[in-house]
Amino acid sequence: MSNRSIRPLVFWPPFLLLFAAVAASYITPDQFLSFTTSINSWILDRFSWLFSLGTLLMVVTCVWVYVSPLGAVKIGGKDATPILSRWRWFSIALCTTVAIGILFWGTAEPMYHLHGPPASLGLEAGSPEAATFAMSTMFLHWSFTPYAIYTIPSLMFALAYYNLKLPYSLGSALAPILGRKLQGPMGQVLDAVALYALVAGMAASLGTGILTLAGGLDNLIGTGTTPVVLGALTTLIVVSFIISAASGLKRGIAILSSLNTRFFFVFCAFVFIFGPTNWILSMGVEGFGDYIGTFFQKSTFTGIAASDPWPQWWTIFYWANWLAWAPIAALFLGKISRGYTVRQFILTNLVFPSLFACVWMSIFSGSALFFDMHGNGLLHNALTNTGAESVVYTMLEQLPLPGITAVIFVFVSFLSYVTAADSNTEAMANLCAETPSESPERADSAGSSTLVLKVVWGATIGIIAWFMTSYAGVDGIKMMSNLGGLPALFIVLGCNASLIYVMTSKKFELHPDAQPAPGARLSEDLLDELIGEGGKKPAST
């Protein structure tokens, strides 16, 4: 650890900008929210088409890579050994990405779509057609497209880091198309932009998560939602994920992710068995059929012809949010994939999590639709009167043992954020640290990033989240994180182009030196063929 120091261009700009944003949101909250909202609206107005087309391209590219010869290439070389078992790898991939979101939005979001479908589609609010639309939209927003957004940069970084032996930086994932231009100061700027978007996003996510947990505890034992309660919850969460991240990949992160995933399966089974089982099966099948049949239409729906703002409010807003998180998450997801083939990578990071998300949404979103449509708008009333965090508790009250299930849900919500935050904290700390040689053999070591940086970023996220929830508002910071979606879109599209280049060049998978054993180096000739000579070669290559 002593041979590592902070990369100032990566660490300080996002660190200072985040605290400036928090100060602005407190001093002039209305103006700050208006400013960030106007910029966000401008981005969505001008680039909705690119968000829609770009994310669709990522799904298509994942399918293309899977069936290509590149699918047989082992990450790290033909003799590379896996860092994690298949189950732990899957559980980390699931919990690192969108798992925290499915808990809170799996029941609340369908209520928005059921009672407020896009005006341009001519659906009557609360109608069976709106219910089918809501169900299929949940599949669109939470399954294959979001996981494709994470898979593309993660896979390209894994190949660049392990097989091309390039540095631990986002610039390495763009090396096949941009050469080594992004391995100097420009690469650090790229890392800083991605880091800012992720930290702001994690703080906003933690803020809303704290409010949800506080609401659940208040509902159970009447604790209230005072700044003291919010501060205690924030401290507990932050300390937990810092300890988990500091304990290393094979201990804290892997164990908590595995436990969290098992809780997901148990919760799914409980609601499926004791909920409206036949409705869940039928609505899930109907919704999935609508999702498949209208996939390309919904993926490219911008609402421009009818001046319908719905796609920007929901689908494109989601894409911007996922994209803002994707670059940093890619560093972690790519780093833990050593020893598996590209095809196994796509199965574990895209296909299996997406199928799980489809099952989850069939059960929870389907149940929410059932209880609302057969209960005179029961859940929609909870959404309107109390907020999104109350919808799931209202639904659980319609099932057996509501008190027990509510307690378990609060615990699973806590665990979900911790498991998502610890892996991203690991990636942030690695990204901010300078090291003379970042060898793949150290990728599974808990000491591969400094504990100090993990504590700093964990504490920063916690302080911002507590301050926002107690004294300011999360909307402005959430908007600021979504602003990172535009630069992140270009980063991930660049990774997509790099992946296509590597796949179609026929050099990577056919050249005997393209799959070196861990610790070996590719030949300089092959590096020049794949990466080009755009810049000075780093000493470690």
Image (cartoon, rainbow, N blue to C red):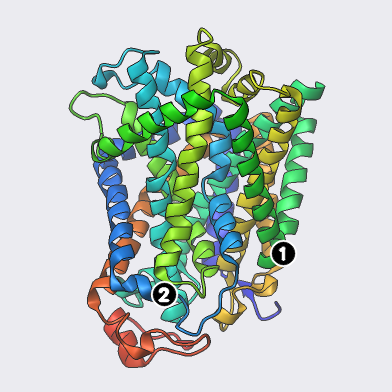
Does residue 521 appear anywhere in the picture?
yes
Mark 1 surroundings: few (<14), some (14-19) or many (≥20) residues within 10 A: few
In x, y percent, where is residue 418? 67, 48
Marks 1 and 2, the one that precedes in the sequence: 2
In x, y percent, where is residue 139? 40, 37
Q: Quadrant of residue 256?
A: bottom right
Q: Quadrant of residue 21?
A: top right
**Amino acid under label 2?**
Ala
Q: Image check: 355 left or right of 498?
A: right
| Mark sitting on residue 251 | 1
Which quarter of the image is occupied by the C terminus? Answer: bottom left
Q: Which residue is mark 2?
A: 160
**Amino acid under label 1?**
Arg
Determine whether label 1 and label 2 are within 8 Å by CB.
no
Q: Image check: 458 left or right of 81?
A: right
Q: Secondary structure at mark 1?
A: helix
